[in-house]
């Protein structure tokens, strides 16, 4: 092959691959699944990998969706991020999300823990109850 | 234009004619294909996108840099494409596009062109880029986080992360055979061990890479991992686990062996390879990083000019 042919081949490869690359990143990009397969939480204490699908699947731990997605009870509108209702920082306040369904001021927010407590109570609570799954900090949080 | 009356002799390796370099690069690209295709099948379109974008953007960056510096365009030799492909092989399939093109720019510019192009680079250009990216955005190399949406019929946890965080019991489920067949998550082109080894043997037989380096690197990993494992089997995984996970195999056959950043004499090659292997396991077992291959090889790249000074003594005596 002469140097000129080599160069032409290279231009060809570069252009074709560029087009394939752009198309893959735009038109054919994979959509995230409706129900998360796994979730990686990234709080300050270190990342937590939560096997969402394994927890819910029958072949896995077979936990009912609404055991965790608890408010309102047994309703599809509960399938949303916990942080919508359990605020990141302030404890026991009424986030705007409540007003999607409740009148302002109608509520007692006494029992709504903040986000990280909500996770800890639910995750660790169930693990303790069933004597299965991690309880120690370092079994969930990794740096 | 270079002064045609002057004959410039420079440091090894020597560029003897264009076509030779080109064949070497295209053969290396070919040898990498089995592992790359495996990754594309496993991860689907996102992997195809990362590989295509990495190869093409590496070539385009080199073209632009050639133009800006008013040098002849060198992308015909396939080296830029190879640097891009190797870069993609180390990335998670879901890497964002801006990370891919930033990486190839760093590889081509900082890894290669500022040293005057092919043959002048003291480090493997791709490793330079990966190291800089790992330090800048370490979350992007978190394979567990990057691949959360994938489901496979094997344990979907990055083996080296599970080992580091939870100890050797957490990786007991990984069998050497399964790991070698690519039953693990990791970089697009770095998990299918069998394909990488096949490519490596092909390159060694063709004389494109030096088997001495690959074999001594793997031996360094094996022996060091074995010593750790014997000392404390609960904390440190066995030698085969270290051989078949992370970037070990791709490092041995595609990175350690790069021409201009590795030695050419026999004993130096053995020291270079073994040193890389030993450092890899030291970083994995007692360092803070999950995988040590990238930094271990960069360190050996630095040592390379010194190592090549270990030459056989001339026979006879000067009086």
Image (tube, coloured by chain):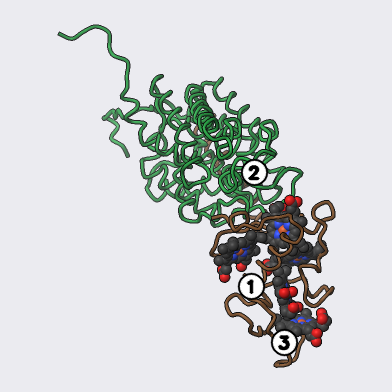
Chain colours: A brown, B green
Name the residue carrying label 2.
Answer: B170
Name the residue carrying label 1.
Answer: A115
Pointers 1 and 2 in contact (CB under 8 A)? no
Q: Quadrant of residue A22?
A: bottom right
Relative side of B132 to A114, left or right: left
Q: Is residue A36 visible?
A: no
Label 3, label 2: how far apart the Cα atoms are: 45 Å
Total of numbered circles in the picture? 3
The crowd level at tag 2 (other Cα within 10 Å; few <14, some 14-19, many 20+) is some
Q: Position of residue A131 (x, y in %)?
A: 74, 56
Pointers 3 and 2 in contact (CB under 8 A)? no
- Is the C terminus of chain B in the top left, top right, bottom left or bottom right quadrant? top left
**Are the residues flagged by discs 3 and 2 from a single subunit?**
no
Q: Is residue A143 visible?
A: yes
Looking at the image, residue B106 lies above or below residue B124: below
**Are the residues flagged by discs 3 and 1 from a single subunit?**
yes
Secondary structure beneath dot 1 equals helix
Secondary structure beneath dot 3 equals helix
Secondary structure beneath dot 2 equals helix
Q: Nearer the viewer, mark 3 or mark 1?
A: 1
Residue extending furthest toward the top:
B316
Judge by depth and name the residue closer to the eye, A117 or A34.
A117
Pointers 3 and 1 in contact (CB under 8 A)? no
Q: Position of residue B117 (x, y in %)?
A: 40, 39
């Amino acid at each position: 092959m002469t140097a000129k042919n080599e160069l032409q081949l290279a231009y060809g490869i570069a252009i074709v691959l560029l087009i394939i690359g752009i198309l893959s990143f735009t038109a054919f990009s994979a959509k995230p699944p409706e129900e998360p397969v796994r979730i990686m939480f990234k709080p300050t204490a270190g990342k937590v990998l939560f096997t969402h699908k394994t927890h819910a699947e029958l072949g896995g731990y077979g936990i009912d969706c609404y055991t965790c997605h608890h408010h309102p009870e047994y309703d599809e509108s509960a399938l949303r991020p916990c942080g919508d209702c359990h605020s990141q920082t302030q404890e026991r306040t009424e986030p705007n999300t409540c007003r999607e369904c409740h009148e302002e001021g109608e509520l007692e927010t006494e029992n709504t823990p903040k986000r990280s407590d909500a996770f800890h109570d639910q995750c660790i609570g169930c693990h303790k109850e069933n004597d299965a799954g991690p309880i120690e900090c370092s079994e969930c949080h990794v740096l | 234009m270079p002064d045609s009356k002057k004959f410039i002799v420079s440091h090894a390796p020597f560029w003897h004619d264009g076509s030779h370099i080109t064949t070497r690069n295209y053969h290396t690209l070919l040898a990498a294909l089995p592992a790359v295709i495996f990754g594309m099948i496993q991860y689907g379109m996102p992997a195809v996108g990362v590989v295509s974008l990495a190869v093409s953007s590496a070539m385009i960056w080199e073209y632009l840099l050639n133009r800006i510096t008013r040098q002849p365009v060198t992308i015909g030799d396939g080296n830029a494409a190879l640097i891009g492909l190797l870069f993609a092989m180390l990335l998670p399939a879901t890497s964002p596009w801006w990370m891919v093109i930033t990486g190839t720019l760093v590889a081509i510019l900082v890894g290669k062109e500022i040293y005057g192009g092919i043959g002048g680079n003291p480090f493997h250009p791709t490793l330079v880029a990966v190291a800089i990216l790992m330090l800048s955005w370490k979350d992007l190399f978190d394979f567990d986080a990057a691949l959360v949406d994938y489901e496979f019929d094997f344990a979907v946890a990055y083996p080296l992360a599970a080992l580091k965080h939870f100890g050797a019991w957490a990786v007991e489920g990984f069998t050497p055979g399964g790991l070698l067949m690519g039953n693990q998550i990791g970089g697009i082109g770095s998990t299918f061990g069998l394909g990488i080894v096949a490519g490596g043997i092909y390159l060694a037989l063709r004389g494109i890479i030096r088997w001495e380096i690959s074999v001594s690197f793997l031996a360094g990993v094996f022996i060091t991992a074995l010593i750790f494992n014997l000392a404390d089997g609960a904390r440190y995984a066995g030698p085969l686990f270290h051989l078949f996970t992370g970037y070990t195999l791709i490092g041995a056959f595609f990175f350690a062996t790069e021409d201009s950043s590795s030695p050419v004499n026999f004993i130096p090659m053995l020291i270079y390879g073994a040193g890389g292997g030993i450092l890899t396991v030291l970083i994995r077992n007692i360092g803070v990083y999950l995988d040590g291959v990238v930094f271990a090889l960069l360190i050996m790249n630095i040592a390379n000019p010194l190592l090549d000074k270990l030459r056989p003594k001339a026979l006879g005596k000067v009086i």
